[in-house]
Image (cartoon, rainbow, N blue to C red):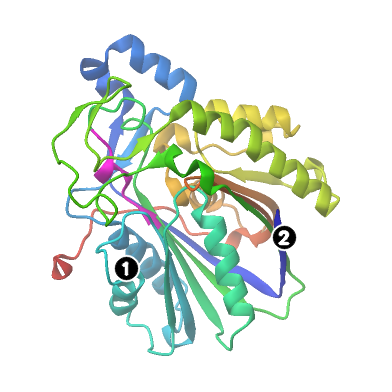
Amino acid sequence: MILSKINNIKISGVSVALPTTQIESQSFYNQFGKDNVDKFIEMTGVKSVCRSVPEQTASDLGYLSAKQLINERTIDVSEIGLLIFVSQKPDYRTPASSYIIHERLGLSENCMCLDINLACSGFLFGLQTAMSLLNSSNAKKALLITADTSVKTISEHDRTMIMLFGDSGSTLLLEKTDENIQTSFAVRSDGSRFKSIITPAGAYRNLNAPVDSVSWSDGIIRSDYNTHMKGMEVFGFSISDVPNLIADFLQERNKTPENYDHFILHQANLYILKQLSRKNKIPMSKIPISLDRYGNNSSNSIPLVLADHFSDTEDLTMNLFFSGFGAGLSWACADVEINTNAILPVLFTDEYDLRFN
């Protein structure tokens, strides 16, 4: 594993934006059958997800979460020297969507913009990157924005995904501090399993892929422009590679689950969270859950849990363990200190900006 430790940078703001439309899993009874849907709910724990309107993009949700944070915390945007946007649903093939958000927020030209193409592990890869760049530059503050509108590449016939994934955006404000704060990270990657979660067409490898949807070998109707997840491969990865990294990191840090107030884990599904709890001896009482109402929110799972569970908690400094894992394949974990005063309540909005169409 790749290890890193970063000192004197704190998370001083957390904001999350969700679409207002909530889709109940039970609304798919007619499409997939009551027994199949009920089994899905029992296994995954997902009872509903939030869906963006067709015009709303990932960058819209990311921008709206950033705008809320800037307004609520009266942030001087001239001090923001770094903007990182993590998403697998960019506005365009080029330019990077971070530049669109940069323009909308009115940030200074003395600001580095960067996109990272990752999904469920993206928050932690982005956090490590943002802290590292902030630490090695003269920038005072950074925005880490994560957002995905997963529904835009999921086949409506794909019962394994359409009920599971929700849409959302989040923003973290990072800033240098004299406080004695250390954040530690561990990451692993395995490109040999890149096909485990893939959207085959839409970029430049398969330029002439047919747009028609057909029945695939798993019996699900989709096209190459839809995201495909090899469920058993991803499941095996989630209950073997991920708990191994968690165990290795805890050993490296000379810590146990007792040293942390909460484990904020990627909300893949309830069964996987229970397996991580069992294998790493983490009490389920220390694993907050948001997936029951919002589903799997890709790179936004961790900030969404923070906003969902701790935005109403005043002035409490928490020692947290983060873990995210997904496409790539990629997986990461971190131990983080954060004060609940930094966390804003969830913003529900369907706003979008057609100027960029």
Residue 154 drawn at (x, y percent): 28, 38
Q: First in sequence: mark 2 or mark 1?
A: 2
Magenta segment: 147-155
Towards the viewer: 71 or 109: 109
Q: Decide: few, some or many residues near mark 1? Use Cα within 10 Å; few <14, some 14-19, many ≥20.
A: many
Residue 3 badge: 2
Q: Position of residue 336 (x, y in %)?
A: 68, 58
Amino acid tagged 1: Ser
Q: Residue at x 74, y 69 (%)?
A: 181
- Residue 97's label in the rendered image is 1
Position of 308 compared to 57: left or right? right
Image point (32%, 75%), residue name: 99
Residue drawn at the location 64% of the way across and 27% of the way down: 275
For the residue carrying disc 2, how many other residues have a C-alpha within 10 Å: few (<14), some (14-19), or many (20+)? some
Dot 1 falls on a residue whose secondary structure is helix
**Residue 131 to residue 78: above or below:** above
Closer-to-camera residue (118/27): 118
In this orientation, does residue 342 appear? no
